[in-house]
Amino acid sequence: MANNVKGYTGYNDQIREGQCKVTKNSWKVITFAWFMGIFLILSGCQDREKERQELRLLGISQLETGDYEGAVASFEEALKKTSSGVVGAFELDILKYRAEAEYGAGDYQAAAYTYEILLQVDEALPEYQTRACLLSAMAGQTDKAMEMYRKLYETQPDSPDTAQALLILGQTLTSQGRIDEAMDLYQQAVNGGIKSGEIYNRMGLCQLEAGDYDEALRYLELGVQTGDGAAMEKLLRNQAAVCEKKLDFARALSILEQYAAAYGATPEIQKEIDFLRTRQ
């Protein structure tokens, strides 16, 4: 009985020794496979990173040469090479370039969408808000653009970017016949303390579009009174046009002569001056 136990124990010892040998060999195989796996993963990551950078450079080159559709495709492909699902510095860079390419291609809706993504992942920078608003308006998504503009106006009413968004949105509303809504936005800006000759010019054009020549002239005169040099040329020309529509040829001529003295007389302006002189 004792021998049997001893023999049984010895047999177990042999099995354990065999198991230890197998385990050591297995660990060698597992360790080798692990290192090979890590090597392949790192190699794959390096290859993917190289492809991403090459696609980025290709997209930038296409963007610079005016191949906007090709640039969009290259930037899209570069984004697909991101496997983590996390938007990092590389992805932000690509998204900015993609938005520029989409804008160049005339796909304003796609560009607006890209800026909306940037708003979500890059701390809602004001420039993204402005561009998303402008591009939405240019894409004909007027109601969406108005909602974005209102948020812009709440946070930065005096910003040049907000003023730019206002002008684009106002023009879009006017072209769609939504003159009252455009006037409301312009009036809000004026009431908020913005004394822009261009805003008054747009208000005058809205009233001209509506057929109210007296109101059109009133807003254009308010614009002239601001002394806004950047808008003065347009204000004077539009003033003369409204006066002519009111059949006030003498005043129209006086304004155009003032215009010509300040900015020179193009053939078109000179022709109009000559015509008005025949109406004296």
Image (cartoon, rainbow, N blue to C red):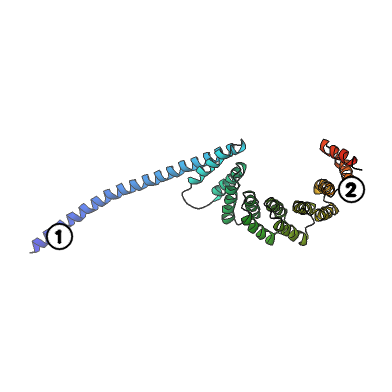
Where residue 220 sits in the image (x, y, percent)? 82, 52
- Residue visible at 22% across and 53% down? 19
Query: Which picture quadrant has residue 190?
Result: bottom right
Residue 62 versus residue 102: which sits nearer the camera? 102
Residue 172 versus residue 40: which sits nearer the camera? 172
- Residue visible at 71% across and 58% down? 180
Residue 204 versus residue 190: which sits nearer the camera? 204
Where residue 250 sits in the image (x, y, percent)? 90, 46
Q: Amino acid at mark 2?
A: Arg
SS assignment at label 2 = helix
Which callout, 1 or 2, points at the residue further toward the start of the chain? 1
Indicate which disc residue 9 carries: 1
Where residue 230 sits in the image (x, y, percent)? 80, 47
Vertical placement of 241 versus 191: above or below? above
Where residue 39 sits in the image (x, y, percent)? 40, 44
Vertical placement of 21 versus 55: above or below? below
Which quadrant holds the N terminus? bottom left
Query: For mark 2, what is the residue?
Result: 251
Q: Amino acid at mark 1?
A: Thr
Residue 59 visible within the image: no
Q: Is residue 253 left or right of residue 145?
A: right
